[in-house]
Amino acid sequence: MTNTVRRRLFGGMVALVALAAGTAHAQTPRRVTIAHGSQQIEITHPGLYLGTLLGWAREEGIDLAVQTTQGSQQALQLLAAGRADFIQVTTETVINARDQGVAARIVYSAVNHYNSQIAALADGPIRAVTDLRGRQVGVFSMASGGVPYLKAVLREAGLDPERDVSLVPTGAGAPALQALRSGTVAALSLWAGAFAVFENQGAQLRIFTSRELITAPGHILATSDAFLRENPDIVGRVGRIYARAAVFAMANPAGTVQAYWQALPQNRPPEVNAQTARENQHILEVGLRDMRVDDRPDQRWGWNDPNGLRALQSFLIANGARTTMVPDADLFTNDHVDAYNRFDAAAIRARAQAYRP
């Protein structure tokens, strides 16, 4: 065998090895970690559990890991430390991030409507917000987000929040519902999920919301400026997982409850029957109402509403939580929205309708 032939054979072997290595690399899923600003993955966040269970993460070449935390602030700290690639948190967390030296940016609007609410008994005397004049209103705590939200709704109705109502800490569980039913408080200022639980317990509620904040996002997906700059394709793929999950859940909420328990068996109730399934489905459906996109100016999944974000910032400033507005260019990007929506929604709906765990 001549030296020339040996060189050609050796070169061919090197090329084959390189090709095999490249193929193996392409087939190796990219590990992506989302830090969730909560101690557990709730049923109302299908983007965090359906993607892995139904194979969409694998299709996107992603090994998706979700890390629970003690809250949105801890999730932000993990992002800043490089221990998470994305965070799913309350929108206010990212609005305040740059003040804390963290260059975080919103990339995907996950919950498109602010989910704080005020509720009174449907058959009670409170028919309008103005009927709260001179009454007591329950809040989770005096430091909770329900306090400034209540004040905003009262101001919209022409009431003086400091004089016209009294606030009573009630928590969000059974004592809060008992306070409402007994008349100790005329209304409660909590969040949609808390009221869904009360409705599961037989409460008939009348809900009041802020006109100004209805377009403000409640939860978002964010990443660091550095990750966004270096991994724009990953941002698009993760957003597409979220979008597919939203379409699936809305097409078949009952099936999504079963999928949730399959994906997270530790969250499955000790006793599963028709009633527990209905109750969990109701909680999910209340959450899905705030994820809807058909009532927004841009009906693409993941689109960040600039006006809604500005309304939320104005709300924070009016209530003393901030003093300045974060410019749009520093707060969010809609550059990847087309990528999020690049999938066959009809096929996802068909799969949802046929889903059997």
Image (tube, grey):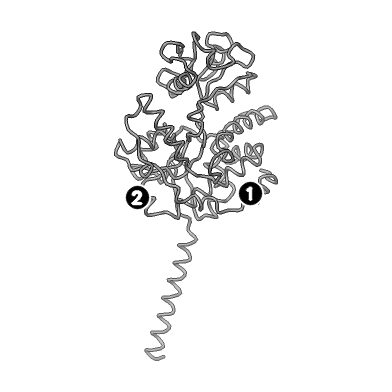
Q: Do the residues labelled 2 and 1 touch (CB within 8 Å)?
A: no
**Number of callouts:** 2
Residue 188 at x, y percent in the picture: 52, 17
Q: Is residue 252 left or right of residue 187?
A: right
Q: In which quarter of the image is the C terminus?
A: top right
Tell me the quarter of the picture where residue 166 sits: top left
Residue 48 at x, y percent in the picture: 52, 41
Label 1's element? helix
Tell me the quarter of the picture where residue 287 sits: top right
Pick the residue in front: 280 or 303: 303
Tell me the quarter of the picture where residue 162 sits: top left
Determine crowd level at label 2: few under 14, some 14-19, many 20+ residues with C-alpha closer than 10 A: few
Q: Quadrant of the N terminus?
A: bottom left
Pick the residue in front: 67 or 248: 248
Counting residues from the start of the chain, the first of labels 2 and 1 encountered is 2
Residue indicated by mark 2: 226
In the rendered structure, which amino acid carries the disc numbered 2? Ala
Label 2's element? helix
Q: Is residue 293 left or right of residue 77?
A: right
Determine which of the numbered discs, if any, sits on residue 289 in the image: none
Determine which of the numbered discs, if any, sits on residue 348 in the image: 1
Pick the residue in front: 155 or 196: 155
Using the image, determine if residue 20 lies above or below residue 58: below
Determine the residue positioned at 38% across, 34% down.
Answer: 74
Residue projecting furthest to the bottom? 2
Residue 328 at x, y percent in the picture: 38, 42
